[in-house]
Amino acid sequence: MGVPPERVLRWEKVPEELSARVPVEQRGPGLGRDSVRLLVSRGTEVSHHAFVELPRLLRAGDVLVVNTSPTLAAAVDATVGHARVVVHFSTCGDDGRWAVELRDPDGRGTTRARAGVHARAGVHTGVRAGVLAGTEVRLPHDVRLVLEEPLSPRGDRLWWARPSDPDVAGLLARHGRPIRYSYTERDQPLSVYQTVFALPSADGAGSAEMPSAARPFTPRLVAELVSRGVQFAPITLHTGVASAEAHEPPYPERFAVPQASARLINAVRAGYGERGAAAGRGGDGGRRGGRVIAVGTTAVRALESAAGDDGVVRPRRGWTDLVVTPERGVRVVDGLLTGLHEPEASHLLMLEAVAGRAAIHRSYEEALAGLYLWHEFGDTHLLLPEEPPHAERCFSN
């Protein structure tokens, strides 16, 4: 399911000058990860801030849901026959196969989608050039991948492939590098792509691409948030490779919502519900509870996948194929901290589900006019729920 035409923003492409080409800390002396800008939306009301102001924009009792998935060095040089390719390792399946994307080197240190189609009797048709079931990909140290079948009937970008050596994590550690796209200026060390919340997993699992909404957080900023009463609820969702050209909706991904996080989120939601009811009755307008704010679209996907129709979050782990849309809505998330997304990205549907179409259009108009920067090294966007006027006064001190 792509983004319906009526949902696409009024502009068609991110202006080249608004692509963040290097991390903010490399743009000048004295800058840190938290030196990015922060656009804040409360309904259609928009304000402009620095990311370091985040602790003043949240309040005691709020809970930030953060993704602990580490970023993998998921791009590996390889060959198919005599042709050079780059393999993007996306997701490890339960049967030991990996979902992979084969891309062509573009001569500038990045890659482009493979062009052209092939067809062969008895084999999936309409596939990219040189990508057929049975194709053998040669990796370093004579490790081989055999492509078996497309990951999804809706497209041929990603394939299930079986490695000759099951230790793919070791292969990536020795020969991989972080995935990057043509809008970036140069290769960066893997540490640049790790967030402060990343935790190594026992089986070497991780994300093919950085859960980038959390990148601006620093230990000092986390400490300040905690000192002000903001809580953190860790979840894990291992992200697959992005659809840089086609803007497809996300494929199934592994996730886990632990019991402690589910319990905390449910407690916060119960308090926020009481606060909202009190505000509606003209009561104290907001001294109980806080809001559930997801840090990144990955956190939304994991959390909503663990929520029942009753809005209660239960501990869950496994695979999720949930695509959050305005029609489906959100059951748990009150707000979202995220990056700025391209105008045809499927993530915009999720943003609309959280904040509404009018709020998204208004905020992106402001981001363009304010020359905010896009992509994983870019600026950030905080979507908060609108508050009753008297509730805002209660929290103005």
Image: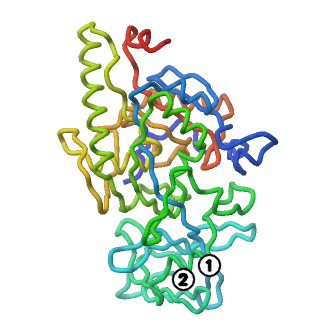
Above or below, 360 against 191 in this view is: above
| Quadrant housing residue 350 | top left
What crowding class fits label 2: few (fewer than 14 Cα within 10 Å), some (14-19), or many (20 or more)?
Answer: some
> Does the rendering let one see residue 184?
yes
Residue in front for this viewpoint, 132 or 324: 324
Q: Report helix, strand or loop for mark 1.
A: helix
Task: Say if residue 86 shows up in the picture.
Answer: no
Q: How is the image coloured?
A: rainbow
Quick one: 13 or 252, which is closer to the camera? 252
- Residue type (three-letter) at the residue carrying disc 2: Gly
Quarter of the image for residue 188 reads bottom right
Left or right: 249 in relation to 192: left
Residue under circle 2?
130
Residue at 35% across, 51% down: 302
Residue 57, relative to residue 391: is it above or below? below
Residue 262 in percent (x, y) is at 29, 45
Residue 348 vertical placement versus 45 (above, below):
below
Residue 174 disc label: 1
Tell me the distance, in whole angstroms, between the alpha carbons under discs 1 and 2. Answer: 27 Å
231 sits to left or right of 342: left
